[in-house]
Structure formats: C-alpha cells, structure tokens
Amino acid sequence: MKSWLKWFILVLVLALLAAGALRLISTRQAQKAELAAQQSAAQVPAVLELAAADVLRVQTLELVQSLAIAGPLRASNSAFVKARVAGELQGLALREGDRVSAGQVVARIDATESQARVRQAQQQAEAARAQVDIARRSFDNNRSLVDQGFISKTALDTSAASLAAAEASFRAAQAGADLANKSLEDTVLRAPMSGVVAQRLAQPGERLAVDTRILEIVDLSRLELEASLSPADSLLVQPGQEAVLSVEGASQTLSAKVLRVNPSAVAGSRAVLAYLAVQSNPGLRQGLFAQGRLSIGKLQVLAIPLAAVRTDKPLPYVQLIQDGSVVHQTVELGARGEQADQTMVGIKGLPEQAVILSGTLGSQRPGTRVKLPLGQ
C-alpha cells in the first residue's frame, strides 16, 4: 500500500473521532442547559388565583353575644287532684288528654263513712244544745233564788260555771259537725284549674289514703323552658333577655324571654336554673326538649369569622395576605358573637381592613404567591 493512502486513512479516522467527540460534547451541553432551565422554572413560585369567597377583610362589627341553652318545656301552671279523705274512688272517667274546666267534678270518694260522721256530729251537737238549755234554766232559777235570799251566791256561781261549760261543749260539738260536713264535701273531687289531664294516677275502685294523687292537670297555654346554666354563665343572664329556640319535632323556631333566674344553685351540680317564657304554639307539649341561643348583649369589636382562625399550631393564627404572599400571623382571640348566622370572634394582632384567607380555602404554606380578585 502506498504511504499517502495510509496517511489519508489515518486522517479520516481522526476526523471521524473528532466529529463524534464534538457531537457528544454538544449533546451534553444541551442536556445541561435543559436541566438548568427546568430547575429555574421549578424555582419560580406558582401564583394562586383567589376568588371573592376565598378572602375577607378584618372589620369592626357589632356582635350579638349569646349563650347556648337547653332544657325541657314545663307548664307554668299545673296541679294535682288529690284525695282529701280516705275511701274508695268512684266515678273517675277522665283520661290523659281530656280537657277540664276549673271547678268541674272529676271523681268522687265513697261518702258512706263521711255521711255517718256528719249524722253523728249533728246528734252530738243536738245533745250539747240540750245540755245548754238545762244549764241555762238552772242558772235562771238559782239567780231568782239568790235575789230572794233563799240560796247563797256560791250556788249561783256554780250554776254559772255549769252553764259556761255546757255552752263550750255545744260550740265544740258544732265545730265537730262543721268538720264532718267539710269532710263530706271533700268526697267530691273538683278540678282546681282549667287545663288538660296529663296523668291518671289512680283507678276507680281503689282504696285511697289521704293525699293520694289521682290526676295531674296542666295548662298548656303558658309553657316555660327550664334551662340549666353554669355558675359563670348565670351571672350574665337577666330577666327580659330574649332567646331563639328550636324544639324537637317542630319545623319552626320559637321566641322566648327570660322570666326569672333561681337565686339558689342546684345541690351537687352547682347549676343555676333559669326560666324562659316560650311563645305559645298549639303543637307544644310539656316535657319536650328545646335548645337554642340566649342573647346576652352586644359588643363593638374588630372581628372575623371563627372559621378563618386556624389552630394547627401551638398558637391560633390567620393566613394574612401581605405584599401578594401568604403570611401566618399569630392572633389573640377575644369575645365571640353571632352575625349573619355565623359565629364571629373578636381578634387582636391584625390591623383593620387587613385581607386574610377565609376558612374554606384550607391551609397554605407561608410565602405562597396569591392573586387577589378584582375589587380586593
């Protein structure tokens, strides 16, 4: 082989190797440039576009302060019909749900024994009256004899004492007759008030003792809520304050007003009972459970919705928008209240008109770039 051909082949091989090396270096540089571009793009933070519902401003608001209350409904007026004399119950036909009027006869107690006692007391009174007549005639006769000088004044004094004793016995017998008549009248059981029978506690034919409960009558035209309050909350409740209640089974809310607060705490629980007059409603019944909120006053304060306050850190904070970025700002919570059917909370640590994220957006990392909606 000629020498020049060998040199030509050698140069060609070197040229091919150099071209491959250059291509490899160019490819690696392109990959590095692309990787650097991707890293630069990753370092550029994404901008979170916000809707009008995602942000709110800190404002001074008038909050309605309220307490949660709950308890059973009870009739303001209720009464038990009791047996005033012992005996067999007769004539009881009323049952739960029946209406009664004040003075209406609801039942009777067998009056046989009472009638016999009345006759006995009347006879005793008649006998005592006869003794009075005898003692009076004896006194009149002795007084005439004393005037004529036939007997001494001591005998007259004895006759006067006998007359006084007979008159006292007659009065006692009359009182016994009145008591027997009263017992006879008590065998007729009457409703002490108008209302509805809530309980029937005895049956006809039963032998009843004195003070045995027979019927419970309630007046459903006036109902009260018996609410149990903690000692601290009871200091904030005053007569005249108003509440809105919901009753189990009722579709509409009811208004109520505080009538009175018990001056004594319940032994054991230390709870204080408050009584609220409830708006009359034909569907309400004694014993139903009601709950609601009692308005105890109004307060002017810098406030935000309680849902906007986050508590996933040791101290409560809000997500403040500052210079287009999210900042976790620690705040101090104050009094709570109601406005527009949502719970608001007084707050310290934010300026008025500061823009924060609402509670519906969730947690965002500090430094997240945001774009506010128009008008914010």
Image (tube, rainbow, N blue to C red):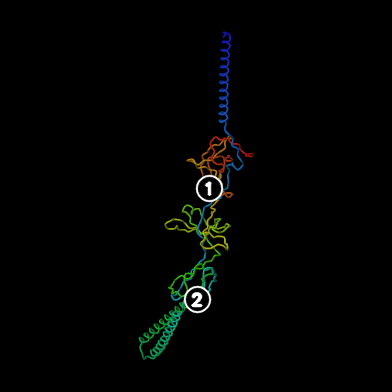
* Residue 245 position in % (x across, y down): 55, 56
* Residue 97 position in % (x across, y down): 53, 68
**Residue ID for mark 2:** 91
Where the C terminus falls, by quadrant? top right
Disc 2: CA contacts within 10 A as few (<14), some (14-19) or many (>=20) = some
Q: How many discs mark residues in the rendered view?
A: 2
- Dot 2: element: loop
Identity of the amino acid at label 1? Arg
Mark carried by residue 134: none
* Residue 25 position in % (x across, y down): 56, 20
- Dot 1: element: strand
Q: Quadrant of residue 149?
A: bottom left
Residue 260 visible here: no
Vertical side of 171 occupied by 218: above or below: above
Q: Determine whether, in the image, residue 269 is placed left or right of residue 320.
A: left
User: Residue placed farthest to the front in the image?
Assistant: 1
Identity of the amino acid at label 2? Gly
Residue at the image point whose x is 49% and y is 53% from the top: 233
Where the N terminus falls, by quadrant? top right
Of the two numbered discs 2 and 1 on the same chain, state the one appearing first in sequence: 2
Residue 126 visible here: yes
Q: Nearer the viewer, mark 2 or mark 1?
A: 2
Disc 1: CA contacts within 10 A as few (<14), some (14-19) or many (>=20) = many
Looking at this view, is 19 or 259 the one in front?
19
User: Residue placed farthest to the top in the image?
Assistant: 3
Cα separation, mark 2 vs mark 1, equals 60 Å
Looking at this view, is 262 or 315 the one in front?
315
**Residue ID for mark 1:** 336
* Residue 333 position in % (x across, y down): 51, 44
Vertical side of 82 occupied by 18: above or below: above
